[in-house]
Image (cartoon, rainbow, N blue to C red):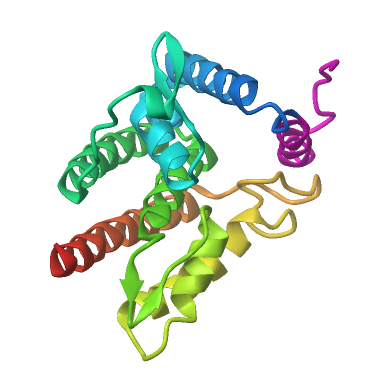
């Protein structure tokens, strides 16, 4: 299919989603293209800006897609011995990503690139939140495979909890950061609005950092209880 650049950043997420949905009818080609794109992003902008092979393989296994990326090849899952991923490994990897994201966001803030700093660390928060899929929170098994679905499912877990309250705050914060007439960090901003002020960017980065730290601790608590 021919490829066209999006006319603006505002339309880019929708254009990308449509292109990916069209390509998804051929799973091996889609996985290969996605892996190639992630590799190029990591090479150009740093490894924290794209999921690595281990993350992609965990998603493929979770969604029961019968392929495993074994660079430079894509193999049928039943043809390889897949090593199970334990929660401790996930946590170690997440904590390393967290440290790197914090350092990078602080550097971007010093360079007066507030919107990029917020985007950088918020991407990690969304990635961390998806790790809760499949866990049991207050007798409810959390479902979904992307941020909105997972966080909203946590909200609806029975019984009052700090995690449920945090999930509600995250939905509100993501809505603000996404809105073109509000934060406009993720999907573009209306032309008549100013960008983030430096102290706004510091606020959002600090909030996001606190939420990631809490989510990692809560994930560790929940997985330790079921180990």
Residue 73, placed above or below residue 11: above
Looking at the image, which residue is at 51% across and 42% down? Answer: 119
Q: Residue at x 44, y 20 (%)?
A: 42
Q: Identify the residue at the far bottom of this view.
A: 159
Residue, far top: 72
Residue 113, position as x, y percentages in the image: 49, 34
Instruction: Give the number of callouts.
Output: 0
Locate the C terminus and report the quarter of the image it occupies. bottom left
Q: Residue at x 80, y 49 (%)?
A: 192
Task: Return the residue nearer the eye: 17 or 192.
Answer: 17
In this view, the residue in front, 107 or 62, is: 62
Query: Measured along the vertical axis of the image, is residue 104 above or below residue 214?
Result: above
- Name the spot of residue 100 as percent of width and height, x first: 27, 34
Quadrant of the image for the N terminus? Answer: top right
Magenta stretch contains residue 152 = no
x then y, percent, for residue 86: 20, 46
What range of the chain is rendered magenta? Answer: 1-22
Q: Is residue 6 visible?
A: yes
Above or below, 182 against 24 in this view is below
Q: Is residue 91 left or right of residue 117?
A: left
Find residue 157 and report its horizontal and vertical position in percent. 43, 81
The magenta stretch spans residue 3 = yes
């Amino acid at each position: 299919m021919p490829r066209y650049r999006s006319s603006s950043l505002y339309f880019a997420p929708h254009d990308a989603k449509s292109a990916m949905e069209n390509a998804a009818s051929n799973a091996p080609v889609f996985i290969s293209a996605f892996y190639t794109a992630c590799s190029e992003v990591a090479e150009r902008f740093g490894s924290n800006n794209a999921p690595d092979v281990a993350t992609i393989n965990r998603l493929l296994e979770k969604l029961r897609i019968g392929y495993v990326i074994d660079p430079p090849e894509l193999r049928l899952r039943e043809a390889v011995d897949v090593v199970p991923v334990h929660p401790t490994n996930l946590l170690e990897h997440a904590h390393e990503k967290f440290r790197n994201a914090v350092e990078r966001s602080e550097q971007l803030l010093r360079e007066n690139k507030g919107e990029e700093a917020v985007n950088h660390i918020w991407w990690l928060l969304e990635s961390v939140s998806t790790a809760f899929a499949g866990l049991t929170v207050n007798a409810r098994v959390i479902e979904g495979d992307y941020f909105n679905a997972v966080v909203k499912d946590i909200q609806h877990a029975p019984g009052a909890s700090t995690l449920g309250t945090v999930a509600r705050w995250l939905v509100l914060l993501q809505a603000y950061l996404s809105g073109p007439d509000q934060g406009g960090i993720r999907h573009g901003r209306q032309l008549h609005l100013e960008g983030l002020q430096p102290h706004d960017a510091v606020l959002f980065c600090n909030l996001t950092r606190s939420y990631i730290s809490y989510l990692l601790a809560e994930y560790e608590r929940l997985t330790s209880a079921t180990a």
